[in-house]
Image (cartoon, grey):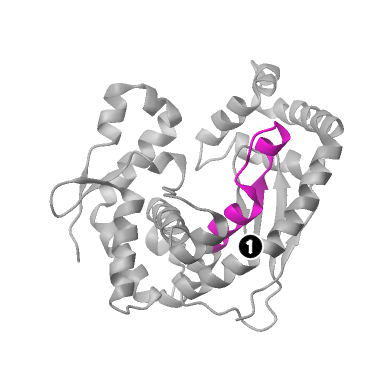
Amino acid sequence: MNAPKIHIITPNAEKEIDLFNKFLNHPIFPQHRNMIFSAFPDLQNSLKNTPRDEEENIVREFIFNFYKENDEKIQKIALEASVEANEKMLPALKELAVLMDYEWKDGHPGYTAIPTILPFSPFEKDLFYFSILGELRGTKGKGVSFIGIHEISHFILFDTLASIYERNFEKELGTNLLYFLKEILAPVLMNQPTIAKILSVENYSGNQNFKEIYILNENNEKVQISRYFQRFYEKARSENKKFTDIVKEMILLLRSIQNEIDLRQKMWNENGPKIFQDDPLLQKYSEGIKITPQ
């Protein structure tokens, strides 16, 4: 199987400025503002008591200064990412396609990867950003391959959903259900042995906001939500079910707990990681969700 190429593009301050301004005021993910401030307290201090319409100039100056101070490190990390993408990401990408019953069309332009200093890794169509903030600060980051496979699983899922729904699948599923589906599926697939071996993945549970969300299984035991769906996927695969059918079944399961999904997302949007330091909030957030197998 031929996998498309991965194009690593050197980041630049102008694009970074656009990203920061977008996620400092994101209408769907308000906690991204807090994540940025947690990673850059100096920026938070600079923006304190600043009207929203005046933030952009302060952000621009902050980013330009950061890039000026770290330019050599940023360029080095981007170069290393190109090597890693060829050595680890392409083999893992081929395995991902097998797990998702997917084939790229002839002439696929490939995927573009851009380093970012954001403390998270957003994506666009066939393009993803991978955070290098950890590497810049001397700690081990997740790396382009780990982040890339996570994000490309979303791209392949979207293609699958487009083949299932005649109309706009985003409208059919709704924001919260689609978000849960894609963010659950990513760790489910990355924990499969063929990918886990290449990327050294071990018990990946997905995004931070999923680690304390639980499903009650048939024995009334709490199982972390990604783990629950991993078992579901693996059982379905053992029965030779196609990925498209597995996705349809997962959607039905998630629809059956739509109210609980909406509640968890509302709690996260309002509180973010503070949930983990507040016992009453955490108790409510981590209550086992009763799910009815279809």
Q: Which residues are magenta?
A: 129-152
Q: Can see residue 39? A: yes
Residue 16 in the figure: left or right of residue 166: right
Residue 99 in the image, given as x and y percentages of width and height = 45, 71
Find disc 1 in the rendering and name its residue.
89
Picture residue at 84% right of the left edge, 29% below the top: 69
Is residue 203 on the magenta stretch?
A: no
Q: Can see residue 126? A: no
Picture residue at 71% right of the left edge, 18% below the top: 46
Picture residue at 37% right of the left edge, 78% below the top: 242
Picture residue at 64% right of the left edge, 61% below the top: 88
Residue 216 sits above or below residue 21 on the image: below
Residue 227 in the image, given as x and y percentages of width and height = 33, 52
Give the quarter of the image for residue 244.
bottom left
193, 135: nearer the viewer: 193
Residue 203 in the image, given as x and y percentages of width and height = 41, 49
